Image (cartoon, helix red, strand yellow):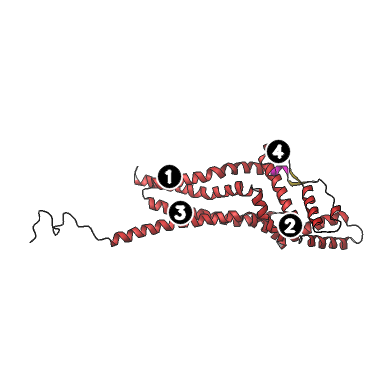
């Protein structure tokens, strides 16, 4: 194969590998990161101590309770009292227990719906009775008065409407397959591109730089995704609380993107330094005497 043709084929394969690397990282994060209930709950757990999240939860709980009990001329005073009580509750250990239980229940319900093709056309709902029971148990352990009298009702709360669940289910299946094949394809294209290159050192350097650029683009996409996601959320979840949740969920993805940048730069720098070192060693090496040099004594040459 001609050197020019080999170089062109190598450039195409390495470009594909550099494009697939961040895509495979994103797919792997969705399939193996977000789909792990334990990791999800662990990522969301610190948000129970975030002031913005606690204020949002307190306002939501307070508004819901106030709508149920407030009536008459004392409506404003009752709402203020309920809101203060809700904010005090978000600073207790019982709230943290309920936060983790609610996140676990919601994640299990959503994941089950995404993996079940027979759930098409049905909304994703979660029963919060186990969460209420867990909170009641914690309040009783803390000797809160009348904690045992808190009613536990089986109430189905809609997490995702049917049309959104169906759309997410299709995307999840695609990402689940892509999470396995995209990284393998990226490695195969990179190795093949380096192997067929006319100058393998340059191909290796290009692959490293391309991988670093792909990781940087992925990190930029995470930042832009945060802005689009937070500003697009309606209602009480909008604002700093949504941003804190987004940051907690994408922490692993941000780390993976910067690992791609570091790996690519390390490969490119190592390849360049190796070439420079070989060049310096070659320049310092003394020249080898030529066999045709007339000043070199040979076995049949007589010294004058």
- Nearer the N terminus, badge 3 or badge 2? 2
Q: Residue at x 69, y 56 (%)?
A: 45
Image quadrant where residue 99 sits: bottom right
Determine which residue is flagged by label 1.
192
Tell me if 287 is positioned left or right of 79 in this view: left
Q: CA distance from mark 4 to mark 2?
A: 31 Å
**Magenta stretch encompasses residue 214:** no
Image quadrant where residue 295 sits: bottom left
Q: CA distance from mark 4 to mark 3?
A: 44 Å
**At which x and y percent is residue 207?**
45, 52
Determine which residue is flagged by label 2.
96
Graded by Cα atoms within 10 Å as few (under 14), some (14 to 19) or many (20 or more), the crowding at tag 4 reads: some
Closest to the observer: 218 or 107? 107
**At which x and y percent is residue 119?**
70, 38
Q: Is residue 52 above or below residue 154?
A: below
**Element on which disc 3 rests:** helix
**Element on which disc 1 rests:** helix
- Nearer the N terminus, badge 2 or badge 1? 2
State whether residue 58 appears in this view: yes
Q: CA distance from mark 2 to mark 1?
A: 51 Å
Q: Residue at x 46, y 49 (%)?
A: 15
Q: Is residue 95 above or below residue 157?
A: below
Q: Are marks 1 and 4 in contact (CB under 8 Å)?
A: no
Determine which residue is flagged by label 4.
119
Q: Residue at x 59, y 49 (%)?
A: 29
**At which x and y percent is residue 300?**
9, 53
Q: Residue at x 71, y 49 (%)?
A: 104
Determine which residue is flagged by label 3.
208
**Element on which disc 4 rests:** helix
**Element on which disc 2 rests:** helix
């Amino acid at each position: 194969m001609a050197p020019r043709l080999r170089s062109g084929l190598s450039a195409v394969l390495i470009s594909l590998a550099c494009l697939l690397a961040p895509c495979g990282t994103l797919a792997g994060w969705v399939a193996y990161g977000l789909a792990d209930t334990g990791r999800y709950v662990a990522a969301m757990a610190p948000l129970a101590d975030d002031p913005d999240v606690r204020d949002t939860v307190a306002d939501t709980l307070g508004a819901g309770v106030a709508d149920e009990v407030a009536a008459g001329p004392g409506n404003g005073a009752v709402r203020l009292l309920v809101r203060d009580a809700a904010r005090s509750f978000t600073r207790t250990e019982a709230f943290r227990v309920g936060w983790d239980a609610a996140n676990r229940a919601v994640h299990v319900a959503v994941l089950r719906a995404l993996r079940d093709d027979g759930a098409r056309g049905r909304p994703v709902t979660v029963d919060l009775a186990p969460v209420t029971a867990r909170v009641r148990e914690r309040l009783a352990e803390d000797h809160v008065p009348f904690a045992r009298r808190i009613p536990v009702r089986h109430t189905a709360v809609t997490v995702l409407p049917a049309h959104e669940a169906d759309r997410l289910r299709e995307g999840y299946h695609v990402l689940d397959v892509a999470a396995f094949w995209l990284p393998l394809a990226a490695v195969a294209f990179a190795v093949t591109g380096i192997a067929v290159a006319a100058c393998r050192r340059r191909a290796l350097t290009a692959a490293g730089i391309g991988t670093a650029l792909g990781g940087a683009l992925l990190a930029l996409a995470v930042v832009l995704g945060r802005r689009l996601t937070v500003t697009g959320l309606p209602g009480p979840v909008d604002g700093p609380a949504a941003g804190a949740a987004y940051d907690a969920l994408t922490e692993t993805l941000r780390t993976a993107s910067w690992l791609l940048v570091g790996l690519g730069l390390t490969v490119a720098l190592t390849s360049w330094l190796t070439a420079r070192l070989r060049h310096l060693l070659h320049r310092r090496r003394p020249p080898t005497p030529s066999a045709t040099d007339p000043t070199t004594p040979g076995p049949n040459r007589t010294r004058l």
